[in-house]
Image (cartoon, rainbow, N blue to C red):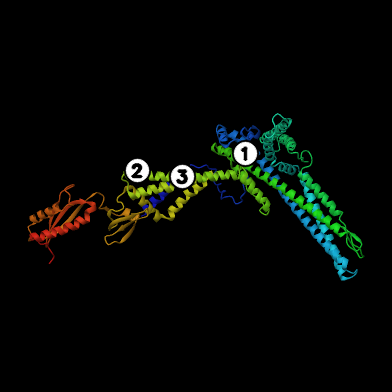
Amino acid sequence: MLRNRVRAILLTGVIGVLVIWAIPARSQFEPPEPDPPAETEVKTEKVELAPEGDAKAAVTAKEPDIPVDELQLLVKPLSLEELLNEAAAWQLLLKGKVEEISNAEVAVKRQNRSIAKQQEVAGSLDEAKKALEESDKALKSAVPGSPEYQEAAKKAEEAKEKLKKAQEGIKEASQAKTELKQDDTLNEALKKAEKTGELELAQTTLDEAKKEREKIDASSPAYNAATQKIDALDKAIKAVEEAEKNQKGFAPDSPEYKQGTQKIEEAHIQLKKAREAITGNTSSSNGGTGAAEKSADKLDEAAATIENTNIKANGETLTANSSPGPGSGQGNVEKKGQQLQKTSDKLQENAQNEAELKNKLLVNATNLQSGRTAIVDRFNVILEELDRKGGDSKYYRKYIEAITKAEIDVTDTQGLGVRVISWLKSDEGGLRWAGNLGKFVGIVLASAIVFQILGVIVSKLLKLSNTSKLMRQFIVVIIKRGGIFVGVLLALTALEVSLAPVLAVLGGASFIFAFALQSNLGNFASGLMLMLYKPFDVGDEVELAGVFGTVDSISLASTRLKTLTADLVTIPNNTVWEDKIINYSHDQYRRIQLTIRSDYSNNISQVRKVLVEVAKDHPSILENPAPPTTGEIEFEEYYVQINLWVWTKTAEFWKTKSELFSMIQERFEKEGYSIATPP
């Protein structure tokens, strides 16, 4: 028993190792860090230092959008020192991209605060307007000095407090805008956001202009004028694309990058001019103030409006910094209410415009994140080659892990929707994962179809080789189901899942299961041995572990026998393999042995002759492999035992044996022979 358990453990372990070795995997698996020495009581965390590398000496990073497969070929001949230079350069590119993303995200948060504050101010103005109207209505009907009059004065005080709140909110929003304008990096993020979609809009304008030109006579001056404008816009589009492409190869803090940014600005200005020459619309953003600056101007205008809004109660002018006093008289409430409503509407409109700018910031941030993903893909190619040549990529991988963690403000529902839509449209986002998902499904389906067909072919070939039914079924199931399992594993690589950790867990788990399921694995191992050596098959008449019957079914765990009394007996394969196995149906022919007890009064020679004659008369008794014969005679106390041996087909064994008994009995009665019976 112990021997079989050990065999089962070793067999399972070998299978697990073979699985890990045989299945290819695109892996970025890192071995776990060793535990710190136990003998030191004071544990200090080791700080990973960046490997030394000269980013300026790098070659591959000069083209950040190089195809991954080309990059894999370029890095193969590089030495370890050269790969360190490449890693330093790609980290610098990644860092610059992350800085752009951070700036865009900070700008989004400040835009959110500004929008929320303006909406809050607009609400305060609406409340102030409502309180002012209620105060005016009460003052008209109240007698000075009466409780109703005092209540009306309180309403005027409430209107003044609402104005104070609105004024403070405007100041906060203006301060946020001022800080945003003063921060060069954040202001740069806003400018980039304002340009979001300009190329697409310009291309749309260009296509429409070409269609309109087709309606004009080619020989007319109007056709030539339209052609000049179209050519100018086409040239401007190409200039923007070229400027953006030239900027990609430099770090954000480099002089080349700043020079490239300036060229992009100039190209965008020319692009707007060329587009406006066709559409006839003009925009102040081509050299004047942008959307962010105009938003700040509107906030200043709203602040001045609130500051100049006067509310009179009891003859005294109430502003945001005054209070009512006794007396009589009413201000022009209707005019002031309209002024407050107009200011509130302007703030709502400005908040809506800023929301559109924020959405552009979100789109730009999503595009930047897609660019970050593209850089990480290429950076990983460098790191994998670095590991293969003996380098240590642990520092860089930790950096990648830290900067790629997604942090999204789920409270900004509108912004979340914009992010999702932008991500779905992104080449490195939704489109990429849609392609990956398509590859995953395709690989799984192709694997299932291929291995199903392969299973059918193998099954037919095994039938020709006279393989046991159990072994044939087992191999076919392994091919079909195992093929699908392998296909799923390979398909996971299309989803950019690292297989090495999964396979390592499977390999380790195989040993754990080997110890936990020793008995079951022993039966499993014995089942494999039964399949391999094929001592019996389904339908054979056998004797297993002392039980006689017909094999009903065989599995990896047990064998089922159906006895002559129709009982179904299940025997563990471990017991079957360790005990004696007798197969009575291993050949197409089977020998029948009949034991006849003849009385001593009978002529033994005649009895033997009669037995042979009776056997030859039966149509199912065969002359080949051997003719009917009687074996040695055994003399017992009350009878003489004679054995009759005949051959018949295995399928006719029991029928022939039964009929032969009947024929012998009839012949004995005819010849007058008696069968011995104990006294």
Q: Earlier in the sequence, mark 2 or mark 1?
A: 1
Give, as a three-letter code, the residue at label 2: Leu
Q: Quadrant of the C terminus?
A: bottom left
Residue 514 falls left or right of residue 49: left
**Secondary element type, mark 1:** loop
Question: Mark on residue 447?
Answer: 3
Residue under the point 88% across and 66% down = 140
Where does residue 567 sit, x and y in percent of width and height?
Answer: 30, 62
Residue under the point 56% across and 39% down = 384
Q: Earlier in the sequence, mark 1 or mark 3?
A: 1
Label 3 environment density (alpha carbons within 10 Å; few <14, some 14–19, many ≥20) = many
Taking the view exactly as shown, the residue that stands out farthest to the top is 219
Where does residue 549 sit, x and y in percent of width and height?
Answer: 28, 57
Give, as a three-letter code, the residue at label 3: Ser
Q: Is residue 497 visible?
A: no
Question: Mark on residue 461?
Answer: 2
In the foreground, 653 or 254: 653
Residue 92 falls left or right of residue 671: right
- Nearer to us of marks 1 and 3 is 3
**Secondary element type, mark 3:** helix
Label 1 environment density (alpha carbons within 10 Å; few <14, some 14–19, many ≥20) = some
Q: Quadrant of the N terminus?
A: bottom left
Q: Which residue is mark 1?
A: 51
The alpha-carbon separation of the residues under discs 2 and 3 comes to 21 Å
